[in-house]
Image: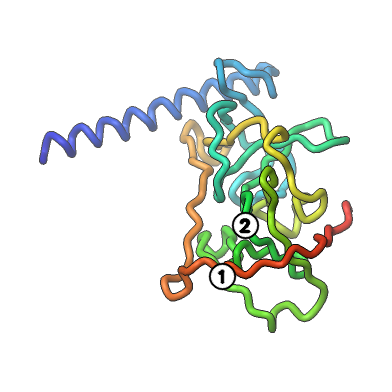
Amino acid sequence: MAVLILVQSLLVIRKKAIAGVLYFLAAMAATYGFINSPTLSGYLFTVAKGSSSYPVIKHDDFLLSRTRPIALSPGTVVLITIPDYDDPYAKRIHGIPGDTIKICDTAVYVNGFRYSFHNSWQGKAFARARCPSRHSEFVLGADEYFVLGDAPGHSIDSRHFGTIRKQQIIAQAMYKGGPETGLQSIPLTATFSRPPQLGAKMTEAVTAKPIWLPLH
């Protein structure tokens, strides 16, 4: 048992060490102007701009992203391309093919639950009383993903430009670092959870036409 614990501890230390080295390379790449270019095969080093995912990702944070493989699952932060925009967006996947999306004003519910950083990614169940005004509800198609910024009030995301397709996802943002973290690398993937008493997936779905928010 002691040997197993030691091996597991060494694996964790090794993983953190590798992440730290990769983050250091990202910082060096940013310092010398190699932003948005792979400095290691299969990885992208970028610098976050804006506050659409604050406080998880802050302005000028370094992001270490992996181009392959990419986990297309809820809670994953991905870099995406949007038509008419030059720089890639860092957004978190909330909905995947087959999921039911309900938009209530600016709030988004996936299969009946809303997930946010401020609620520690624990699902908050939909209540019709909280949705007195306009809303839409639809099911994601075979190659449709719904992405959001972690700061919904400051983010342009799938509520504005609609769902995205797999070909628009160029990388998975694995770690972040910045002035406040030094060389420490912070994992970006979140684990979405639901209250135990509401753990069953809501299966009722409506395929009404989505209502997108304006791009401003």
Which residue is drawn at the image coordinates 64% and 79% (left, top)? 127
Q: In this view, does 4 lie above or below 33?
A: below
Q: Which amino acid does label 2 sit on?
A: Asp
Q: Which of marks 2 and 1 is nearer the N terminus?
A: 2
Q: Which amino acid does label 1 sit on?
A: Lys
Q: How many marks?
A: 2
Which residue occupies the foreground of this view, 211 or 63?
211
Q: How far apart are marks 2 and 1 (CA)?
A: 16 Å
Q: In the structure shown, which secondary structural element does the residue marked by tag 1 occupy?
A: strand
Which residue is drawn at the image coordinates 69% and 51% (left, top)? 146
Q: Which mark is residue 124?
A: 1
Which residue occupies the foreground of this view, 130 or 110?
110
Q: In this view, does 205 lie above or below 4?
A: below
Residue 38 position, x and y percent, is: 62, 18
Location of residue 1 (image quadrant): top left
Which residue occupies the foreground of this view, 153 or 194?
194
Residue at the limit of the structure toward the bottom, as seen here: 129
Residue 80 position, x and y percent, is: 71, 37
Q: Nearer the viewer, mark 2 or mark 1?
A: 2
Residue 79 position, x and y percent, is: 67, 36
Structural crowding at the residue carrying mark 1, measured as other residues with C-alpha within 10 Å and reported as few (<14), some (14–19) or many (≥20): some
Structural crowding at the residue carrying mark 2, measured as other residues with C-alpha within 10 Å and reported as few (<14), some (14–19) or many (≥20): many
Coloring scheme used: rainbow
Q: Mark 2 points at which residue?
A: 99
